[in-house]
Every structure is written in C-alpha cells, then in structure tokens.
Image: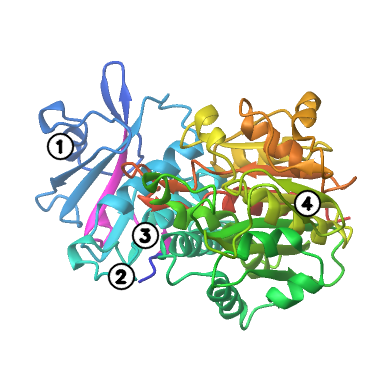
C-alpha cells in the first residue's frame, strides 16, 4: 500500500483525519510547541505537558485524546529534539514527520500541522512523512495495526501554490524510489540474484523513457569484463551488467552512475565469518540506488542524460571460484592480482567505471557498500565521498540539501604504493589501515580524466539497529536523494 500526500489550507483543528500531528522541540525550560495550528488552549497546554511524559526528544511520539475540541479524535505530539524554535532546519522537520508516519500506524489518515509555510520546510515535511510510511511485506503479512496511514494531509498556506504542488509530486517520486531500493535490499538473496535483479530492472523501466540493456555471462566474457566474470564464476547464478539509460532530447549534460550489485557476498574463498554474512544480502544497495535514481530522474523529466550501470554478481565459494593469487584482466586491459576474494566490489565496479567512461560522460559517480573501514571511520549513519575534479564537493552540497549525511574523505597518493603487484598492474588490496581510502585509490585507476566521485555507503545502507526518524530497520534507500539532488543541480546550458 502506498501512502498519498496532499496539501490543505484547512485549519488544523477542523481537519478530518484520524490523528492530528504537531511537532514539539526540547527546550531548556521544557517542551516547546512548534506548530502554528489553531489548537484550543487546553490542547496546546497538554501537547507540552511533562505530566503526560512529553519531552520533545527526537523520535518521541505521544498521543492525547482531543475530547472533541478538535475534529481529529487524537492529537499526536512528535519530538523534534533540541532545536532553536525560531530556526528549525528542514531536516529536523523531515525526521519528525517521518517518525510520526512510521510510528502512528493502523489508522487511515494523518494530518500534519508543522511549520510548513516556506518551500524548503514544506518539501521536507511531505518527503519525511512519505519516507516514514514504509512497510516490507514480501515474506509476511503486515498486521493492520502496523500498516502506515493511507493518506497524509499537510497543513500549509501554500496549498494552492503551483510550486508547492510540484514539491508534493517530487516528494512522492523520491519516496517511491527510496521505498523501491529498500524493497530490493530487504529481499532474500535466494530471490534476488543477478539475473533476477536484471529482470526487476526491466520490469521497473517498462512504460518509462528508460532503456534497459543486459549483458549475460557470455557477453561479459567476450567484452573483456574480467572483474564481473571472476567475481561471479564461483556461483551457479552467473553475473550480469545492466545498463539503464535515460536520454532526454537536447540534454546538455550526461552523468553516469555505477552501482555495486553483489547480490550476496560470502567473501568467496576468502570467506567471511558466519555472523558477518547475515546482512550481506544488502551488498547490492549501490546498484539498487543507481537503478531507482535513473528511474526517478526520468519520472521527473530532468533535462540531463543519466546512464546507470548495475554491476551484478554473487560472490560464492566453490570449485570454480576465483582464487587468491589469480590475475584477472579488467575491462580496458588493466590486470589485477586478486589477493583477497572478499575485496570483490572494487573488481566489478572497475569494469562498470571503464564501461561508463567509454561513453565520455561529463561526470561519473559510483555508489557502493564497499568497505567495513567506512563503518569504522564514520559509523552507521554517515556515508563517505572521495574523488576528483571538484565533484565530491558537489556531492556533499547535494547531500546537505537533501538531508543525507555524507562526509568528504581524501585520496592520499602515497596509498597507491600499497597496491603494487609483482605480477600485475595492481593488486586488489593494499594497506589495512585507511582501507576505505585505499579502495578509492584503486577505483581511481579506472576513470581516466573524467570527473569522478565514489560514495561508500557500507554503514548507512542497512540499519541493523532501531528505526529512527524516517529510517526503518533493514534497507534504508540511502544515496537516492543525494544523487537525485545532484542531477537536479546540473547546468542545463
């Protein structure tokens, strides 16, 4: 079930919804109501009442019966956290709206009376509400009491404004893309293997302006895609390279996106510990983000050409698997000595990056759950970006604008020495210390002079902890909003 969002100028107290939601900040003197809703005084006092346990802490949701003084039978107070009530950032509202729609389930409708009378705040509230309204039901029936509301109404004075309506449309497109990525990441690897992922891409693009091309294992071998072939050769389910292309007429810019799509990562012969494999169905989150970013760009009819490359393989141990000390030839001719088969993501990405740059795009970005070192450095909520040509700075700006957390990292030239091989052009691993950066240095070898950015989303792509804000447990859909915002910022002349 998909939640629909609409804008309304109806006063909050007269809104015909099951639950009316208002935001409360945690202030030094106690909770502070942030909305401008026309709530009766008694209800406003209850909304910030410590006696009811209201603190305003982020993610807190308290429900209060309205007793008939508002049309909605229930008032829900959602915490925004410690913020200046006079200077609330859009992301604070996005997370609060998402916390409300995620936690207030089993009802048909929600009304959000948030500070939403400027474009940025309105966009954040609508997007947050839709992002939070997510449930994964492929393998079990979600009880009615746990289903998100079917309808969300956002109170705003901009309800009749055309630009505001476009904001709502964009938010719906973004939420659908993020939810679709979450669904793919949450899908069991028995059901989402390379060929199945390729079929999913074809089905998702049907009826859109996106063209899908799939290379199978024979075409990959013939085309010199040695990384994809080597990583996938240990599995009975062979690799695929999927190209998804959106090419609007008269586009002045062309951006290529390359996604790591390891549908399950056992580590290969350099096998992972059992505990580390439990979330390895998520090792295709980069490819999922790329697929649905391209589809979202087409749905929004952005005036920029976007080509996605989904590098899909299953990394399994077997008698046919690649071995440590094997030498492979990547697309484009560089040879790589494989010292660790669990450093496989960079091998499939290298093929995708070369294929992408052969089309001479203006910029190329890769997105990957690439290294555990990213989690050590930045934790589970902050992605890393590194690259060349000023592109990483643009990624950081896009992330900030979209509400995602991305931190810039360097590419120290001295790390290249640790990738030297005695028998090949380079090895697939180098120094353990700074492993996230070494992986980036490896990838830089395959982009030539094309401006390039590498996003390592290993931690933020899969939430193993409690849900928060608009982020559920499991697949998060991270990077879609950053990539889409970056595409929207591309010059059109």
Instruction: Check disc 1 and report the residue beneath it.
Output: 42
Indicate how the structure is coloured in the image: rainbow
User: Closer to the observer: label 4 or label 2?
Assistant: 2
Q: Disc 1 and disc 2: Cα gap in Å?
A: 45 Å
Q: Disc 4 and disc 2: Cα gap in Å?
A: 36 Å
Task: Answer above or below: position of 90 versus 320.
Answer: above
The residue drawn where x is 26% and y is 37% is 60
Q: Disc 1 and disc 4: Cα gap in Å?
A: 56 Å
- Where does the magenta region start and end? 5-24
Instruction: Check disc 3 and report the residue beneath it.
Output: 134
Left or right of 148? Residue 401 is right
Q: Check disc 1 and report its element: helix, strand or loop.
A: helix
Q: Earlier in the sequence, mark 3 or mark 2?
A: 3
Q: Quadrant of residue 290?
A: bottom right
User: Closer to the observer: label 1 or label 4?
Assistant: 4
User: Closer to the observer: label 3 or label 4?
Assistant: 4
Instruction: Check disc 4 and report the residue beneath it.
Output: 364
Q: Check disc 4 and report its element: helix, strand or loop.
A: strand
Left or right of 470? Residue 49 is left
Is residue 436 covered in magenta? no
Q: Examine the rendering and report whether any part of residue 215 can be seen.
A: no
User: Closer to the observer: label 1 or label 3?
Assistant: 3
Residue 409 image position (x, y, % from top left): 67, 29
Residue nearest the observer in this picture, 488 or 70: 488
State which quarter of the image contains the N terminus: bottom left
State which quarter of the image contains the C terminus: bottom right
Q: Earlier in the sequence, mark 1 or mark 2?
A: 1
Q: Earlier in the sequence, mark 1 or mark 4?
A: 1
Residue nearest the observer in this picture, 427 or 472: 427
Instruction: Check disc 2 and report the residue beneath it.
Output: 139
């Amino acid at each position: 079930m998909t939640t629909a969002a609409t804008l309304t100028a109806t006063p909050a107290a007269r809104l015909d919804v099951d639950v009316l939601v208002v935001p409360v900040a945690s202030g030094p003197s106690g909770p502070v109501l942030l909305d401008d809703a026309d709530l009766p005084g008694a209800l406003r006092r209850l909304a910030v009442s410590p006696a009811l346990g209201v603190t305003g802490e982020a993610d807190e949701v308290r429900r209060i019966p309205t007793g008939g003084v508002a049309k909605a039978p229930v008032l829900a107070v959602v915490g925004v956290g410690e913020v200046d009530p006079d200077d609330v950032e859009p992301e604070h509202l996005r997370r609060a709206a998402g916390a409300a729609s995620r936690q207030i389930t089993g009802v048909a409708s929600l009304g959000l009376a948030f500070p939403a009378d400027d474009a940025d705040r309105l966009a954040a509230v609508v997007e947050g509400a839709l992002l939070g309204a997510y449930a994964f039901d492929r393998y079990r029936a979600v009880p009615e009491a746990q289903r998100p509301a079917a309808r969300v109404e956002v109170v705003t004075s901009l309800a009749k404004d055309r630009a505001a309506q476009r904001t709502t449309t964009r938010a719906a497109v973004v939420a659908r893309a993020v939810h679709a990525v979450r669904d793919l990441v949450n899908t069991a690897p028995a059901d989402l293997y390379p060929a199945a992922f390729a079929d999913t891409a074809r089905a998702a693009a049907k009826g859109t302006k996106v063209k899908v091309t799939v290379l199978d294992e024979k075409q990959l071998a013939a085309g010199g895609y040695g990384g994809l072939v080597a990583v996938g050769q240990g599995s009975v389910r062979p690799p695929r390279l999927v190209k998804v292309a959106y090419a609007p007429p008269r586009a002045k810019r062309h951006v290529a996106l390359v996604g790591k799509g390891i549908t399950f990562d056992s580590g290969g012969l350099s096998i992972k510990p059992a505990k580390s494999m439990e979330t390895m169905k998520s090792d295709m989150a980069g490819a999922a983000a790329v697929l649905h970013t391209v589809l979202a760009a087409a749905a929004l009819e952005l005036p920029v050409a976007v080509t996605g490359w989904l590098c899909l393989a299953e990394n399994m141990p077997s008698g046919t698997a690649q071995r440590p000390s094997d030498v492979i030839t990547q697309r484009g001719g560089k040879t790589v000595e494989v010292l660790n088969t669990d450093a496989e993501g960079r091998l499939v990405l290298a093929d995708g990056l070369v294929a992408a740059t052969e089309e001479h795009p203006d910029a190329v970005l890769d997105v990957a759950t690439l290294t555990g070192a990213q989690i050590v450095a930045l934790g589970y909520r902050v992605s890393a970006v590194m690259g060349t040509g000023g592109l990483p700075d643009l990624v950081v700006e896009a992330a900030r604008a979209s509400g995602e957390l991305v931190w810039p990292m360097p590419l120290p030239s001295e790390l290249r020495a640790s990738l030297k091989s005695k028998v090949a052009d380079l090895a697939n691993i180098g120094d353990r210390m700074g492993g996230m950066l070494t992986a980036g240095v490896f990838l830089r070898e395959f982009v030539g002079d094309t401006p390039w950015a590498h996003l390592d989303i290993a931690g933020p792509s899969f939430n193993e902890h409690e849900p928060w804000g608009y982020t559920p447990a499991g697949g998060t859909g991270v990077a879609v909003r950053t990539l889409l915002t970056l595409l929207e910022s591309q010059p059109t002349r």
